[in-house]
């Protein structure tokens, strides 16, 4: 059975690199078609959903904060002040870099340790160990926001396919 580290760190880093690739395709499309980059960054699937830019911020926050929770360390704080594709790429790169600094052995006790997090809508939520946290929150939430970014760009006409989301390189 793979360790918590093996299930999270390489998976999240790869997904963030793939998210970067998808965003780069979006930026190219904006330049090629004359769409203002800010228009694309503020695009939504539907009015009551968050825009592309915010979904990238949440995906990176979920990645770095979840890795920190699992390793029982403090995550770095990222300000949500990005306004351009270049700034989003830098944010993704910072998240990938941070995640890579967490040692594999920092995850060793995560399966036996309860993880509590505070959410805006549900207050404190407690998970009994890493497996529950990963399956019930972390991975679904992280991939929801990555997939939403892909879907927003597809809806905007960016020529992307499943390969771009899963295996861009």
Image: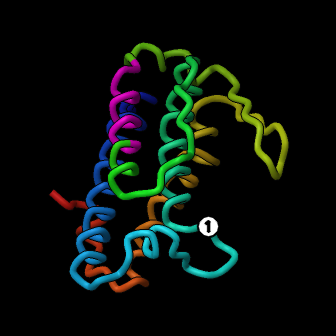
Q: How is the image coloured?
A: rainbow
User: Which residue is at the front of the view, 57 or 74?
Assistant: 57
Quadrant of the frame with the C terminus:
bottom left
Quadrant of the frame with the N terminus:
top left
Residue 146 seen by the camera: yes
User: Which residue is at the front of the view, 100 or 43?
Assistant: 43
Q: Is residue 151 above or below residue 135?
A: below
Q: Is residue 167 magenta?
A: no
Q: Which residues are magenta?
A: 91-102
Residue drawn at (54%, 42%) of the image:
61
Q: As drawn, is 125 to the left or to the right of 1?
A: right
Q: As drawn, is 140 to the left or to the right of 164?
A: right
Q: Which residue is mark 1?
A: 50
Q: Secondary structure at mark 1?
A: loop
Q: Main secondary structure of the magenta part?
A: helix
Residue drawn at (55%, 79%) of the image:
45
Residue drawn at (46%, 67%) of the image:
41
Q: Position of residue 119 (x, y in %)?
A: 76, 44
Q: Is residue 92 magenta?
A: yes
Q: Position of residue 2 (x, y in %)?
A: 38, 32
Q: Position of residue 129 (x, y in %)?
A: 64, 29
Q: Is residue 77 above or below residue 142?
A: above
Residue drawn at (72%, 34%) of the image:
117
Residue 148 seen by the camera: no
Q: Position of residue 105 (x, y in %)?
A: 41, 13
């Amino acid at each position: 059975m793979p360790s918590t580290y093996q299930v999270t760190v390489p998976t999240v880093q790869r997904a963030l690199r793939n998210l970067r690739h998808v965003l780069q395709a979006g930026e190219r499309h904006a330049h090629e078609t004359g769409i203002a980059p800010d228009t694309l960054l503020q695009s939504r699937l539907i009015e009551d959903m968050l825009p592309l830019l915010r979904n990238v911020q949440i995906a990176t926050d979920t990645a770095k904060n979840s890795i920190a929770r699992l390793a029982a360390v403090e995550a770095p704080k990222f300000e949500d002040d990005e306004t351009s594709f270049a700034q989003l790429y830098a944010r993704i790169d910072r998240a990938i870099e941070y995640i890579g600094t967490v040692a594999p052995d920092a995850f060793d006790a995560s399966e036996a340790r309860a993880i509590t997090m505070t959410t805006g809508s549900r207050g404190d939520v407690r998970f009994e160990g890493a497996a529950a946290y990963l399956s019930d929150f972390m991975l679904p939430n992280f991939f929801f926001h990555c997939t939403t970014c892909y879907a927003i760009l597809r809806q905007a006409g960016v020529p992307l396919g499943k390969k771009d989301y899963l295996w861009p390189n």
